[in-house]
Each structure stands twice: as C-alpha cells, then as structure tokens.
Image (spheres, rainbow, N blue to C red):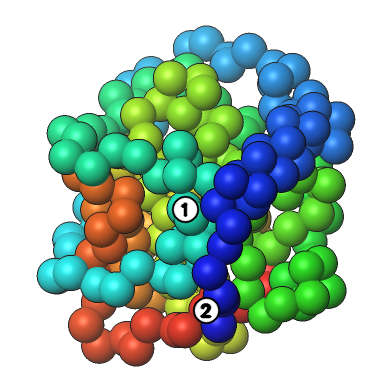
Amino acid sequence: MWGDFDMTKKNVWGFVAFAASMVLSATAHAQVQQLPKPKAGIAVAKLPATTNAVPTGDARPVWGWVDFCRRLPAECRGAGARAQEIRLDGATWNALVEVNRSINAAIEPITDQDHWGVPDRWDFPSDGKGDCEDYVLLKRKVLAERGFPRQALLVTVVIDHNGDGHAVLTVKTDHGDFVLDNMRDDVLAWVKTGYRFVKRQSQDDPNRWVALDDSVAAPAQVAAH
C-alpha cells in the first residue's frame, strides 16, 4: 500500500509539520497545555476499577503504525523496556479525563482519504484534523510528555459497534485497563466500551503487537472515525 520513503526528507518535513502543529493548530496543544489542574479530594476507594485485557499471543503490527514509525522513529522507540502501569489516584484520573476531552474537542474528525488522499495514514493531527488513530497518537504523546510511562499507553485496535476497525488508547493502571476514545469524552473501563478488542502494542516493545481475541479477524486498516 505504501512505497519506500526518502527518510531524510520525510522525517525532516514530518517533524517540521509536527513542530509547527504542536502549537497544534494552536488549538489542540494550547488547550492541552492549559488544562485545569486536577481536582483534589477523590478517594482511592472511589476510583473506578476493572480487569486487565490478557494478551493471547503475538499479532502483526498495524501497517499504519509501521508507516508512522518509518517517518517518526523517535516516537516508536522503547524495545526492551520494562512493563509499567500507572498508579491511579485523583490527580492521574483527572489528567486522563481532561486530556481525552480536550483533544477530542480540539481535533476535527476527517477521513484519511479526504485528509491525505490515501485510504490509511497514521499521523499527528498537525492541522487540527484527523481520524481515530491520529487522536490516539496525540493523546499518547501528550500524556508521555506529562510523565506517564509509554509502556502504559498502548495503541489498540478494536471492532466498534458498527463492525468497523477502530483505534483507541489503552491505559494500563493499577486499577485495571481504561480506554481513551475520540468517540466519547468519558474514560471507560475496557470492558464497558462495548468494543471487541483485537490487538494492541506490547508493553515491553511498542513495535511488537499482541492479540487480545483470537476469535476476531484483525481489520486491514482502521475505519475513519
């Protein structure tokens, strides 16, 4: 689907586009950086809790991710890292909710075909527009910049309510797995989304993917949401 890339030019222009955008169409990044401070007073006992999705074996990485890593390899480093999870407390929970809501509000949904003229392209929403995986990549980056370990921020492919492939961000915590989704502002436990989970990044290597449900055929690409 994709040919070889002139890595030097592509990486330079990809980074320039991204740097220009992390003024993120001044909208997304500015909104994220100005998020309200987390509200205090949420007792740990009142925080949501759920289970962990259990990998069932290795899976083929999504081509969009492979292509994204060719263009922005710095975003895909971490092989051999130690698996980590986030300690969930009031501050971290509110940070997850605010980042999810702010980025959802800042980015205008658009299909890759309309945006880039190709069926599937993963990228940062540098011009304030993107589809589901672009929201995911930006949320992952912003949370990592805030100190959340990337090993706990996993790009995940699911089957949505319409039977289409869809990308979400799974956040591994000591209270279970939660999902940041551009289709909703609330952060939900993975089992409460109604999605069928197909595969996601491994915690010890972002370029190794693991299957989550052998009964579901992995889509060739995620749908535009």
Query: Residue 175: where, in percent of width, then height?
Result: 27, 37
Q: Quadrant of residue 142?
A: top right
Image check: 94 left or right of 199?
right
Residue 44 appears in the picture as rendered: yes
Does residue 215 sit above or below 55 in this rendering?
below
- Going 23% across and 42% down the picture, which residue do you hit? 79
Disc 2 packing (10 Å; few <14; some 14–19; many ≥20) = some
Q: Quadrant of residue 2?
A: bottom right
- Going 42% across and 70% down the picture, which residue do you hit? 62
Residue under pointer 1: 69
Q: Quadrant of residue 16?
A: top right
Query: Residue 184: where, in percent of width, then height?
Result: 64, 55
Query: Residue 162: where, in percent of width, then height?
Result: 58, 85
- Going 47% across and 84% down the picture, which residue do you hit? 220
Q: Kindly check if marks 1 and 2 are in contact, taking CB atoms under 8 A apart as contact.
A: no
Residue 161 appears in the picture as rendered: no
- Going 16% across and 33% down the picture, which residue do you hit? 82
Q: Amino acid at mark 2?
A: Gln
Q: Which mark is residue 51?
A: none
Q: Nearer the viewer, residue 79 or 45?
A: 79
Q: Amino acid at mark 1?
A: Cys
Q: Nearer the viewer, residue 132 or 17?
A: 17
Disc 1 packing (10 Å; few <14; some 14–19; many ≥20) = some
Query: Looking at the image, is mark 1 or mark 2 earlier in the sequence?
Result: 1
Does residue 131 sit above or below 169 in this rendering?
below
Residue under pointer 2: 221
Q: Assign a secondary structure to mark 2.
A: loop
Q: Nearer the viewer, residue 102 or 68?
A: 68
Image check: 6 left or right of 192?
right
